[in-house]
Image (spheres, grey):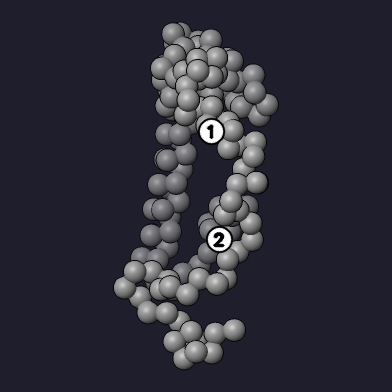
């Protein structure tokens, strides 16, 4: 519908029409390129050594074959990440887990602290109402 509207536009100068038509053709070429790349990826995934990983990721709700393939290509080998069982022995991981469950009870958590009277950023003065002593 939008493309039809663009095609129906009438311009005062022929150069304007030429510009819009050129941009419309560029968009069509870009879409064709994307379609060719998607088709190539979908054809190559079954032959890939990480195809089983792609299928496992694809088992998640809403993950298409293309999204799973791009995700696996970006991450690479998942074996470089420690498994949860290996991480349980890591003191940093245990500390993270402890904070995750008691995070709401840590000191310093709560509402906004509006009593701060320092500069907003280093090198910037305080707001005028604070400088004048009219801060509530």
Count up the numbered dots.
2
Q: Position of residue 39 (x, y in %)?
A: 49, 23
* Closer to us: 32 or 67: 67
Q: Indicate which label's residue lies in the foreground, 1 or 2.
A: 1
Can residue 57 be seen by looking at this rendering? yes
- Res 96 label: 1
Q: Residue at x 43, y 59 (%)?
A: 20
Q: Residue furthest front?
A: 107
Residue at the right extreme of this rendering: 61
In percent of width and height, residue 100 lies at: 60, 37
Whole-number angstrom distance, CA of label 1 to CA of label 2: 60 Å
Q: Secondary structure at mark 2?
A: helix
Above or below: residue 50 compared with residue 97: above
- Residue drawn at x 55%, y 60% is 8
Task: Judge the density around disc 1: few (<14), some (14-19), many (≥20) Cα neighbours within 10 Å.
Answer: few
The structure residue drawn at horizontal position 64% and vertical position 23%, both measured from the top left corner, is 60
- In this rendered view, identify the residue nearer to me: 1 or 125: 125
Location of mark 2 (residue): 8
Q: Callout 2: 10 Å neighbours few (<14), some, many (20+)?
A: few
Taking the spot 61% from the left edge, 27% from the top edge, the residue there is 63
Asked whether residue 71 is in view, the answer is no
Residue 117 at what x, y percent from top left? 47, 75
Callout 1 touching callout 2 (CB < 8 Å) = no
């Amino acid at each position: 519908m939008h493309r039809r509207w663009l095609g129906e536009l009438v311009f005062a100068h022929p150069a304007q029409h030429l510009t819009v038509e050129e941009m419309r053709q560029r968009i069509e070429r870009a879409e064709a390129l994307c379609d060719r790349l998607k088709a190539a990826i979908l054809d190559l995934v079954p032959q890939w050594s990480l195809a089983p990983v792609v299928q496992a990721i694809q088992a998640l709700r809403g993950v298409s074959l293309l999204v799973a393939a791009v995700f696996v290509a970006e991450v690479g080998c998942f074996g470089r990440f420690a498994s949860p069982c290996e991480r349980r022995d890591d003191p940093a991981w245990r500390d993270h887990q402890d904070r995750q469950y008691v995070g709401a009870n840590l000191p310093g958590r709560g509402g906004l602290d509006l009593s701060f009277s320092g500069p907003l950023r280093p090198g910037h003065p305080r707001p005028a109402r604070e400088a004048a002593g009219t801060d509530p």
